[in-house]
Structures are given as structure tokens and as C-alpha cells.
Amino acid sequence: MSDHPIEGLMSNAMESIKEMVDVNTVVGDAVEAPDGTVIIPISRVACGFAAGGGDYQVSEGGKGEKGENSQPSSFGGGSGAGVSVQPMGFLVVGNGQIRLLPVDGNAMYDRLIDMMPSLIDKLQSMCNKDNKKQGVKGETDTPMV
């Protein structure tokens, strides 16, 4: 038994999608800056696919009825696919750290979250210096909450 024509149609469309979408579409080629920092673009990829078709028979009378004079079954169908690539940000690797720089407008919140650990460290060191200057006895390495 031979394959149905829709199988070939779908297989051909899926092979085309595989060629278009690979890991390099999501994570782009890295770019190295003169200072040694590596910048990697990150994207969101969405794919959609549809295929359909049907068999029909045509009789000599043109009414599509099965009968002695009807022709062999014919197939009509089609397929379509779409790919959307949306840039999300850049992964920056350098100076002993890894940062994600988003493309959208909410970068300020991400930047604040990235800065929180260093801010807490600075506040703790300032409090420890003040405690030592005032001659406060006790533990000076207790973290602030």
C-alpha cells in the first residue's frame, strides 16, 4: 500500500521548517568585543504548521458519484507554515560575571535586581565600619535583614 499524498505534503513542509529553525536561530552567533567580553543574542522562536486535503472522485457526468464510469480518486490539498523570531536580549559574558540585558522596556527592574547583592554588601560594610568607630562590642559580621 502506497503512502497517502498528504503524508508527503506534510513531510516536505516539516523538513522545510527543520531547515529554517535550529539552535542558532534561538541563540545567535557570539560576538567578541575588543575588551574580551562575549555578547550572545537570545531570541524567542515560534512555529506554526497546518496541512489539509481531501480525496474526490469525478464521474464522466461530472456529478462526483461513484459508478461504472467514474475516474480514479484524485487528491487536492495544501500546507502552510510560519515562523516568528523575536529578539529577547543579550547574554553578556565578561569581567568575571554573566549578565542578561533584556531588549524590552522593563530593563530598569532587571538592573535593580542585578545590583541588589552588591548594594547589600556595601551597606553591610558601612554598618560594620560605623560599629567599629563607635566602639560597639559584639559581633560585627551579622548580616542585616
Image (cartoon, grey):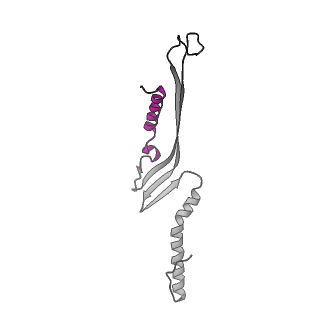
Residue lying at 55% horizontally and 77% vertically, measured from the top left: 144
Q: Eyeballing the image, is 9 above or below 28?
A: above
Q: Main secondary structure of the magenta part?
A: helix
The quarter of the picture where the N terminus appears is top left
The quarter of the picture where the C terminus appears is bottom right
Give the extent of the magenta segment.
2-30
Q: Quick one: 91 or 15, which is closer to the camera?
A: 15
Q: Eyeballing the image, is 88 above or below 19?
A: below
Residue 43 lies, in percent from the top left, at 50, 47
Residue farthest to the front?
Answer: 68
Q: Eyeballing the image, is 34 above or below 117?
A: above
Residue 121 lies, in percent from the top left, at 51, 73
> Is 96 displayed left or right of 65 in the figure?
left
Residue 16 lies, in percent from the top left, at 45, 34
Q: Quick one: 109 or 55, which is closer to the camera?
A: 55
Residue lying at 46% horizontally and 43% vertically, measured from the top left: 25
Q: Quick one: 55 or 96, which is closer to the camera?
A: 55
Q: Eyeballing the image, is 66 above or below 80?
A: above
Q: Is residue 44 magenta?
A: no
Residue 42 lies, in percent from the top left, at 48, 49
Task: Report how many numbered discs are placed on residues in the image.
Answer: 0
Q: Quick one: 54 or 90, which is closer to the camera?
A: 54
